[in-house]
Image (spheres, rainbow, N blue to C red):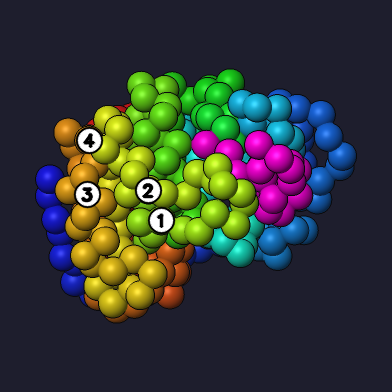
Amino acid sequence: MRIVTVGVLFVAIATGCGGESRPLNASGGKLPTLSERCGSRIDAKVGWFRASDGVLLDGASLGSGKTGVVLAHESPADLCGWVPYARVLSRAGFRVLLIDHRHFGRSQSPTGARSGHFSNDLEGAVKELKREGAKKVFLMGASFGGITCMVAGSRLGSRIAGVISVSGEARLGNRYGPDAELDAMAAVPKLRAPLLILGSRQDGYLPVADARALIRRAGSSHKQLALFPGSYHGWDLFSLSSSRASASRAVIAFLRPFE
């Protein structure tokens, strides 16, 4: 296990241009382009794919690398929050799939037993990225999405190359039913894929003690914790934090050996 405390650096994150609408793998209603939806001009194909239990989910895909990254959003939010950093990853040579979990964005909201089965969303996203050409796929999530990625990662085994949690809390309440998969602390002992956790030292949602406990409990043989100054939470680490260049470098350095 490696714990890194990172200093303050600066980088500007550029926005892209253009907009493209092509279907992913499943049929569904017409979706707006990512540019129309998120207010940032960006080349991406938008469309539908299915979770492993059949729930219809919307997503946006960009990049063409052999290493894929699924980006899972915060709550309450949708995939638009990841758009700036998705461009950074695609420009660095990675294939990226931004998704809306069930109950969020334009994705379906199932009831009953399937309501909180967010791992099935990520399993479907991994399958979609591999269908598009990725040979290895990482799960990366912010806050709520960090939890879903850690939980799903503990279940997907060798089907994923690693997990990156950006301020993913130790656990959240079961607002999506008694079977909601939002307890990362219980899940990570079963995780075997490489794990990177990023957080801020004054983040009230992911205290340093919780971040260290998650890393300590994780079953991964390769695991890292990168802590940054301030109280920035989730994807704010890549947009608002003065350490955003360092945070981005930590992610890309974690991904590079697996290309």
Amino acid residing under circle 4: Gly
- Specify the quadrant of the image occupied by residue 199: bottom left
In-front residue for pair 219/32: 219
Q: Is 114 covered by the magenta stretch?
A: yes
Q: Residue at x 30, y 34 (%)?
A: 191
Q: Residues within 10 Å of mark 2 (few under 14, many from 20)?
A: many
What is the magenta range? 97-119
Q: Which residue is mark 2?
A: 184
* Circles 3 and 4: CB atoms closer than 8 Å: no
Position of 152 relative to 253 (above/below): above
Amino acid type, callout 3: Ile
| Cβ atoms at labels 4 and 2 below 8 Å apart | no
Tell me if residue 145 is in the magenta stretch.
no
Determine whether the residue tagged by mark 4 lies in a helix, strand or loop: loop
* Identity, as a three-letter code, of the amino acid under mark 1: Arg
Residue at 42 percent across and 27 percent down: it is: 156
* x and y, in percent, of residue 181 in the image: 50, 44
At x 16%, y 65%, the residue is 5
Q: Which residue is mark 3?
A: 215
Q: Dot 4 corresponds to which residue?
A: 219
Residue at image mark 1: 171
Q: Amino acid at mark 2?
A: Ala
196 relative position to 141: left or right = left
User: Among all residues in the image, which is located at the extreme left?
Assistant: 2
Disc 1, disc 2: CB below 8 Å? yes
Which label lies toward us, 1 or 4?
1
Mark nearer the N terminus (2 vs 3): 2
